[in-house]
Each structure stands twice: as structure tokens, then as C-alpha cells.
Image: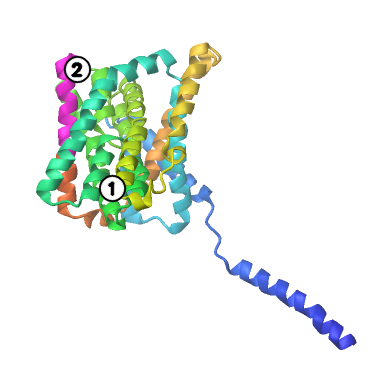
Amino acid sequence: MADSSSVSGSIPAASRAGKASRRSSIPQSPSPLYGLALAVVVGICAMVLGRWMPLIGGPVFGILLGIAVRNIIGVGPVFKPGLQFASKQVLQWSIIALGFGLSIQQVAKTGLESLWVTLVTIVVAFGSAYLLGKWLGIAPKLKTLIGVGTAICGGSAIAAVTPIIKPEDHETAFAISTIFIFNIVAVLTFPLMGHWLGMSDAGFGMWAGTAINDTSSVVAAGYSYSVAAGDYATIVKLTRATLIIPICLVLAFLVAWREKKQGKSNFSLARIFPWFILWFLVASALRSTGLIPEALHSSLHLLAQFLIVVALTAVGLSSDLRRMAVAGMRPIMLGLGVWVAVAGSSLAVQSFLGAW
């Protein structure tokens, strides 16, 4: 009996040991602190260079230094979680922090001023994506992804519509790669073109906010031009980003109509809604009520700019140029055509309205 008892008592112990062994064999995800610390260190270097060469600015230096480190030195997998966190969450925090420096009246005024330009550029983006994509023989879903990415907010818009239209993985990769190429081109060329054209801060902010894709690239180009242009471009871009909601609703309706068996797919309004925009408005409202002391305004704006540089540095540190090279030429030609059409239409509407 004693032997039987000892054997039966040893089974739970062995089971617990086995479970502990299995738990210890499960790979642990690296801490986000590694990637976040890397983005902060490189971001500080970018801020210093931006103060030294203000025409280029910290945001652009952040992207360029990040890309250089990633593709020359290399970035290990241990940094990936932190870089993803910085390029998404920290960017959203920076936008919220910018709200403390802008009155709600200024936000509303700028949003209304940019609405017509935004609507025109969106129509041009979808129209040119359809016509040029048809001429180039681009698959319908890839055309939609590039059109949405160029019209609304780049990778975020592509990510939002992907579960609705359900493209192939390579189509999503093509679209994001193509959009990213022209984000980088826009960040580097728009400020130079704006100075060459003699654009005002508000005019350039309108142009950047309506013609550049991702929020990060809009912010980088805007603040490279001037602080006032960066503030204006950010508000215009956030106004434009809210239009992702009706676009996704329309796409969901079309998919449900065409594919009755699947209904409305996995569409979720709560999932795609850019909630950080609401917190940006809350911060702006707090500024307008006078609850934020005047002495803190400059410090909050400096904090917002630093968070922007850190986020953009993380974007650069996450960008693999070799993967970009396999995107193919036809999607790139489509992205170029749509991007030029959107940028040109934005300038044309501003010129017509006398808002240049």
C-alpha cells in the first residue's frame, strides 16, 4: 500500500513538472522597452540634427536615420515589439499632445476650410486609381487598396479596408510598399517644392494634409516646413482621416451586396474608428477652456514634437528597403499616377479658391 501511495503521489508531481517544463519552453515575447529605447536614442540624435539643420528638421532626420540604421547596421527581432509600439501608439500620443497647443475654434475653422479640398482629392484619388489601374491591368482589390491608401491615410486606411474586401496577402504587401515609397518621397520633396512655389504656411499645410498619405509623413513634411504649417497640416490630415469611416461603410455595403452569402464580412466600426482623434479634440477643448496653464503650452508643444520624432524614427527603423524592391513596377506606377493626381488636384483647388 505504501508503494502504491508513493506512486500515485508522484504522478501529480510529475505532471506539475511537465507543465512547468512546457511553460519554460514557450518563447517569451521581447520587452517593448528595447525597441522604444532604440527609437528614443536615435530620435534624440534626429532632434539635435534637426535643430542644426532646421530646413530638414527632426522628423525627416528621424525617418532617414531610422532607415539607415535598419538597412546598414541591422535591427534585431528583440527590438520589433517596441518599434511597433512607438510607430503606432507614440504617434497617436504625439497627435493628442499637439491638441493641447491648438484651440478648438482653430481646429474647427481649419477642418471646415480644408473640407472641399479634401473631398476633391478623394474623388480624384479613386477616379485615377480606377482608370489608371484598369489601363495597367492591376487587380481590382489592389486598385482599391492603393486608391484608399492614397485618398485617406496610407497604411492605416489599407489596414482598415483589408478585412472588408479580403485581398490576397501579396496584394496588401504591394499596396503598403507602394504607399510607403511615396510617403518618403513626399517628406523629402514637398517642403522643397513648397518653398520653391512660395507657399504660405497655411497653403503648404493644406497641401501636405490633403496630398500626403500617412499621418506620420504629413506631420514630418509639415513641421519640416514650419511649426505653423505642421499644426495646420495635422488638423487637415485628421479631418481627412475621419473620412475613413464613410469609405469603409460604403465598401462594406458593396461587399455585402456583391457577396450575399458572406453578408457584411468581419466589418467592425469600433475597430476602424481612429479614437485618438477624439482625444485630440478633448485636449484642444481643454486648451480652449483655459484649464491648461499658459506656462505649460510651449512645454507640451515641445513634448509633442519629440514624440513625433520618436515615432517617425521607429517607422524608419521598421522599414526594410529590400522588401520594398520586390513590390513590382506596375503597382508603383499606379501609386505614382494616383499620388501625382491627388497632389496636383490639391494645388489646383487651392489656386482656384485663392488659398495658396
Q: At numbered mark 1, what does the secondary structure look like: helix, strand or loop?
A: helix
Write down the region rendered in magenta. Answer: 338-356
**Residue positioned 42% across, 58% down in the render:** 76
- Residue 222, by quadrant, is top left
Question: Could you tell me residue 276's position as x and y percent?
Answer: 46, 32
Q: Could you tell which of marks 1 and 2 lies nearer the N-terminus?
A: 1
The disc at residue 258 is 1
Q: Is residue 29 above or below residue 313?
A: below
Residue 226 is left or right of residue 194, and the answer is right
Residue 55 on image: x %, y %: 27, 28
Residue 132 locus on image (x, y percent)? 12, 43
On the picture, is 310 further left or further right than 72?
right
Residue that label 2 marks? 356
In front of the other: 86 or 206: 206
Q: Look at the image and tell me whether residue 58 can be seen.
A: no
Instruction: Locate residue 296 relative to residue 241 in the image: left or right.
Output: right
Q: In the depicted view, which residue is nearer to us: 12 or 135?
A: 135
**Residue found 33% across the figure and 21% down from its top:** 232
Which label sits in the foreground, 1 or 2? 1
The residue under label 2 is which amino acid type?
Trp
Q: Amino acid at mark 1?
A: Arg
